[in-house]
Amino acid sequence: MIQKNAELAIIAKGLAKTYDKDIEALKSLDLEMRKGEVFTILGPNGAGKTTFLRILCTQLMPSKGDATILGDSVVNDPVKVRENIAMVPQDAMAYSNYSPWDYAYTFCLLRGMDKQKAKRKAEEAIRSMLMWEMKDRPAQTMSGGEKRRGLIAATIASDAPVMMLDEPTSGLDAIGRRNVWSVLRNKAAGGDTIVLTTHMMDEAEMVSDRLAIINKGELITVGTTAEIKKKVPFKYRVIAPEDAVDQSSYSDVTKIGDRLVVYLENHEEAIQLVSKMLKKGVNAEASPVTLEDAFVHLVGGDIYEIGEKPDSKQGANR
Ligand SMILES: Nc1ncnc2c1ncn2[C@@H]1O[C@H](COP(=O)(O)OP(=O)(O)OP(=O)(O)O)[C@@H](O)[C@H]1O
Ligand SMILES: [Mg+2]
């Protein structure tokens, strides 16, 4: 039994999911999300993000453990949970003959709103997604990104206090993404809780109050972007051509084709390396580490091996 907590929207305790007897998609995950925050779940492909969201939105039963949404258990009270949540699934497809208006208005009616409120909420949401001009176009006449925005509009119209969005902005252009970020931030400022997944680190950094990184069904870390960046043992990075850097002098180096990313603990070291490069007449750039650097370090991604060419000694250097 999970204790109620007035500050928290979601509490997951010991959540596990095993598919087909031996695929352990989630292994005893504990995670808490506060009311009114945008919380992002990061993790490599197959980490268990979608499995986690599907359990939270009662599409999937956990094999072990439980989670509560605003105090209701996804295992024992799924019907009550559903009253408070709305979800944009990762692979959601719009019905081909439904327009954004059909979707948003019907969702609102299905959630029990009267017609007047449903119209108002549908209009607000469709306008917020910059889709009013195409509100009556059937999905089959819309582009991929437009369809996605239509589905997000329907979810926003639902007025659910907890919204879950699985890679909501995949396929959206830069303006569409920023608009979604803005809508989600405003929702959270109004007290709603937003849980999303993304593979885009700039998005995670821009939109989240806090993030969790999961890998192979386990929690790696949780915190603000700044807190997560502090969990790696370097603060700066320098990108330089591979053949210009003496790799043995540096302990954290990632190879990306014929380039190296050298990770350094402080600014002086970064400046020193850039000056060395400039003296050699090669271009090098120093910058603070990004969330992506921290993510790759924390999930143990070995780009060096993936990017290694069999004939790299001959072919990769310029
Ligand atoms: N229905 C299923 N049956 C069997 N295995 C599954 C099923 N759904 C997911 N899996 C497996 O469970 C693991 C977690 O999958 P999940 O979809 O939760 O990952 P994800 O973090 O959302 O990945 P992605 O970033 O690619 O969307 C993967 O190993 C996947 O192959
Ligand atoms: Mg997924």
Image: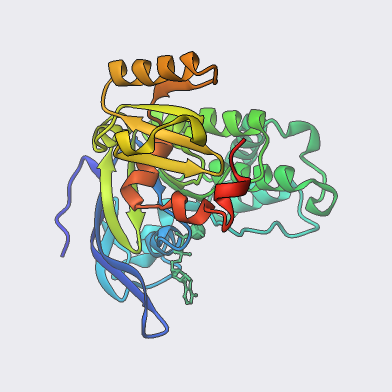
Residue at the location (41% across, 53% down)?
302
Residue 92 visible in the shown view:
yes
Image quadrant where one finds the C terminus: top right
Residue placed most toward the observer, 269 or 147: 269
Residue 224 in which image quadrant: top left
Could you say which is closer to the camera, residue 34 or residue 273? 273
- Give how far across and how far down residue 154 sits, in percent: 61, 46
Residue at image coords 29%, 37%: 228
Q: Indicate the position of residue 163 as horizontal and vertical percent values.
A: 45, 46
Up-down relation of residue 244 to residue 62 (above or below): above
| Vertical position of residue 216 compared to residue 11: above or below | below
Front-most of residues 59 and 18:
18
Total numbered circles: 0
Q: Where is residue 183 shown, x and y percent of the image?
A: 53, 31
Apparent side of residue 296 relative to residue 150 in the rendered image (left or right): left
How has the structure been colored for display? rainbow
Residue 209 in the image, given as x and y percentages of width and height: 34, 32
For residue 148, side relative to residue 71 (left or right): right
Q: Residue furthest bottom?
A: 21
> Where the N terminus falls, by quadrant?
bottom left
Residue under the image location 54 percent in, 21 percent down? 282
- Residue 145 shown left or right of residue 223 in the figure: right
From the viewer's perspective, is residue 303 above or below residue 261? below
Q: Is 149 situated left or right of 188 in this image?
A: right
Q: Residue at x 29, y 39 (%)?
A: 251
Q: Is residue 159 visible?
A: no
